[in-house]
Image: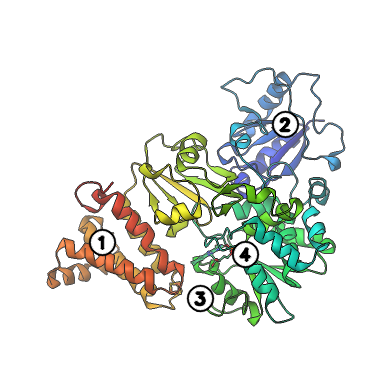
Amino acid sequence: MTIVFISDDAQALACGADAVAAAFEKAGCTVERVSSWGMFWLEPLVEIGGLGYGPVRVEDVEGILTRHAELVSASTPHPSSSATIEAWTLERQSPTVKQVQGDDLCVGSLEHHPFIARQQRHSFARAGKTRPLSLVDYTATGGWTGLDRARSMAPADVVAEVTASGLRGRGGAGFPAGIKWKTVLEAKGTTKYIVCNADEGDSATFADRMMMEGDPFHLLEGMAIAAHAVGAGEGYVYVRSEYPHAIAKLNAAIALAAEKLAPFRVEVRVGAGAYVCGEETSLLNSIEGKRAEVRAKPPLPALEGLFGCPTVVNNVLTLAAIPHIMAEGGASRYAELGMGRSKGTMPIQLAGNIKHGGLFETAFGITLNELIHDIGGGTASGRPVKAVQVGGPLGAYIHPDQFDLPFDYEAYSVADALIGHGGITVFDDSADMGAMARFAFEFCAAESCGKCTPCRIGSTRGVELIDRILGSGKTAPDSVEALPQMHNARKAGRSRDEEFQLLEDLCETMQFGSLCALGGFTPYPVRSALKHWPEDFGQAGSAQ
Ligand SMILES: Cc1cc2nc3c(=O)[nH]c(=O)nc-3n(C[C@H](O)[C@H](O)[C@H](O)COP(=O)(O)O)c2cc1C
Ligand code: SF4
């Protein structure tokens, strides 16, 4: 019996994985649905006996089975041929391949594929290898080791280990997880909560989704460790509504693991569908059933969070780093990875106009040159890279001249850029950076919670201002409301230089006057676009 492994991750499903799985079953194979390897350009990716084939269409199925029989020598033990699928573990053997030709769909051993072999997968160690809802697979691959160890320790010692690991929040702000946990542990009150932020609204990001769909027990284990560390009895995972597969997987995983997680209880809450719902205080309001409006800080959520109780709010990837840290000892292995104060690994997400898009988990310090060119293979269009945006819609646009910048919170901050949630959107030379700057304001205007003036009003004034700077040719036909503004500007007698000065004043007001980072960080994409591509704003020359 040939056993075929196909992902049931949303990306694979979107590329037709269900139809391919059905075709293999029709051909007499046993199909096991596993998590995704994160090699999205190969989806639907099929693994047979350790060999990968992709992207596979239904009509390729027969040919692949014939080809596979040719490629694998008869003597090669099939990793899953023992019929004991229940005992299937990470220790699969590398198949003996006679010859892989360039023109067929076989990409060789997935474990040894350069995209995978170059990674340092810790949080995503199971990606592509286990069945997401199999407790047997999870336990057989080291699952619950971190939780068992943490529960054998005093809460303060767990917090100390997380602090020693140097783990920083992966949701965007990079705040040290151990310090946040210590604040909650030491906060007064008997009711405390763990809230997992799975709103994942940044452009180019999908790592949270992959974790929830592919390894949900791993996230729950991280939350249970956090609960033990701070003395919380309940937790919520706030998942964006656009992730129905993740929601279903998490709910199923919570039911399956309830006994192991006890006395800690977890519930899923479905997001309210706005980018700002991912801001932690707005998210807490949303869970409480209120309008997702940002709360002023202080008080910090760590002291007065959900329902006024001390609350840990952590991103999926932050919590998913925890089981590994606790299993191995935070001060040792994890803290040795990375550079400077950016410790451990980051699941980087390559997206946009890139040949090899997907998930690349590696230690901090890697450069954009390596990520975009060596690993990502350059643009999908084959045209030169013009810009990349790192850190979602509020991140700076980075010019190729800066591509030796190491992936490190501090290095990015010095360059007026953000790491954010590790999403990278690649643009080729057809991108219009003036239009992208306009989009930054437009996005902010659409997503603003409306609580503070610099963001609520400033973003709309920003769109109008960029329209004037770019000239009527760049003004969208539906932006008729911009026309009176153009008229006003002319009446006010502002010169072009004065319009640019006004843009800088607006950016400064939004940066320093906004209540949260939505308004506060919108100037990053605007300023960086103007600085590196002034010609796209009708300015002479490049400021490089
Ligand atoms: C507008 C806005 C949107 C945000 N969206 C997210 C999000 O989708 N996911 C996330 O984890 N953090 C998001 N954040 C950051 C959170 O406010 C918060 O810093 C994070 O959940 C803390 O977890 P961490 O310390 O593990 O990163 C957002 C912040 C802002 C200002
Ligand atoms: S910056 Fe924007 S999103 Fe943030 S509180 Fe102010 S209005 Fe709301």
Q: Earlier in the sequence, mark 1 or mark 4?
A: 4
Q: Is mark 4 within 8 Å of ligand 1?
A: yes
The numbered disc on residue 314 is 4
| Residue 54: x %, y % from top left | 61, 33
Q: Are marks 1 and 3 in contact (CB under 8 Å)?
A: no
Q: Amino acid at mark 3?
A: Val
| Residue 145: x %, y % from top left | 80, 53
- How far apart marks 2 and 1 lie (CA) works out to 54 Å
The numbered disc on residue 50 is 2
Q: Earlier in the sequence, mark 2 or mark 1?
A: 2
Q: Earlier in the sequence, mark 2 or mark 3?
A: 2
302 to 165, vertically: above or below: below
The numbered disc on residue 294 is 3
Q: Amino acid at mark 1?
A: Asp
Residue, disc 1: 467
Q: Kindly state the secondary structure of the residue where label 2 is placed.
A: loop
